[in-house]
C-alpha cells in the first residue's frame, strides 16, 4: 500500500469506528460483554493508541537515533496481522482505559481523536515511501516495526475494537 493510500485507510478506519460509537445510545455506550471493555472504553483506548504519533512522527532524526532502521524485509499487511494475532493481544497499562467512562466524555474523546488524526495526517506528509519502509518504531507486542508496518497495524486496530463492540451488542 502506497503512502497516500495508507494514511487514507488509517484515517477512514478510525473515522468509521468513531462514527459507529458516536451513534450508540447511553446504554450501548456503557455496555460491556463479559470480560471486554465498554464501547466508551474502546473509544478511549483508540485515542490512547494514536495520541503519541503526532509528536513522535514529527522528528525523523529522533526516530532514526532512538530506534534506527529495520534490518529485515518489510512485512506485508497480511504478515503484520498474522504476527499480531500470535501475540497476547493485551494492551500495556498506558493504553488501558478507565474502568468507568461516562457518556458525557464521548464528545470530548471524539474531538480529541479527530484532532489527533488531522495532526497525524499532516506529519505523515513529510515521509517518503523509503522512510516508511526503513525507519522503525517500537510496538509493545511486536517489537520494532517499520512506520509502514505500524500504520498497517494501526489501520486494522480500530476495526478490531469495533468488532468487539458489535459482538457484544
Image (cartoon, rainbow, N blue to C red):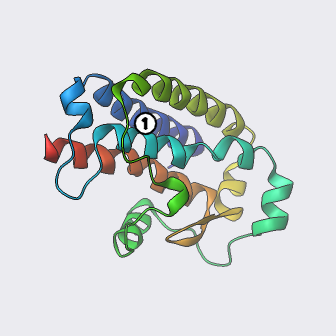
| Residue 127 appearing in the image | no
Left or right, 10 with reference to 143: left
Left or right, 143 with reference to 37: right
- SS label for mark 1: helix
Tell me the quarter of the image containing the C terminus. Answer: top left
Quarter of the figure with residue 136: bottom right
- Residue 77 image offset from top left, x and y in percent: 43, 60
Task: Please say if 79 is above or below 14.
Answer: below
Task: Please say if 66 is above or below 30.
Answer: below
Q: Residue at x 22, y 23 (%)?
A: 25
Q: Residue tagged by mark 1?
A: 14
- Residue 2 image offset from top left, x and y in percent: 55, 46
Q: Identify which residue, 99 or 118, lies in the foreground.
A: 99
Q: Which residue is drawn at 39% across and 22% down?
A: 104
Quarter of the figure with residue 72: bottom right
Left or right, 147 with reference to 22: right
Q: Identify which residue, 144 or 89, lies in the foreground.
A: 89
- Residue 110 image offset from top left, x and y in percent: 46, 26
Amino acid at each position: 500500500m502506497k503512502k497516500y493510500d495508507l494514511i487514507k485507510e488509517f484515517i477512514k478506519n478510525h473515522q468509521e469506528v468513531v462514527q459507529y460509537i458516536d451513534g450508540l445510545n447511553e446504554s450501548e455506550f456503557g455496555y460491556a460483554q463479559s470480560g471486554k471493555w465498554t464501547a466508551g472504553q474502546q473509544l478511549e483506548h483508540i485515542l490512547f493508541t494514536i495520541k503519541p504519533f503526532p509528536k513522535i512522527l514529527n522528528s525523523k532524526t529522533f526516530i532514526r537515533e532512538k530506534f534506527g532502521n529495520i534490518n529485515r524485509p518489510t512485512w506485508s499487511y497480511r504478515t503484520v496481522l498474522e504476527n499480531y494475532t500470535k501475540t497476547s493481544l493485551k494492551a500495556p497499562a498506558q493504553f488501558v482505559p478507565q474502568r468507568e467512562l461516562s457518556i458525557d466524555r464521548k464528545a470530548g474523546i471524539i474531538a480529541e481523536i479527530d484532532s489527533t488524526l488531522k495532526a497525524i495526517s499532516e506529519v505523515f506528509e513529510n515521509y517518503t515511501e523509503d522512510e516508511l519502509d526503513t525507519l522503525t518504531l517500537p510496538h509493545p507486542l511486536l517489537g520494532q516495526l517499520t512506520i509502514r508496518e505500524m500504520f498497517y497495524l494501526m489501520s486494522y486496530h480500530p476495526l478490531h475494537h469495533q468488532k468487539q463492540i458489535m459482538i457484544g451488542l
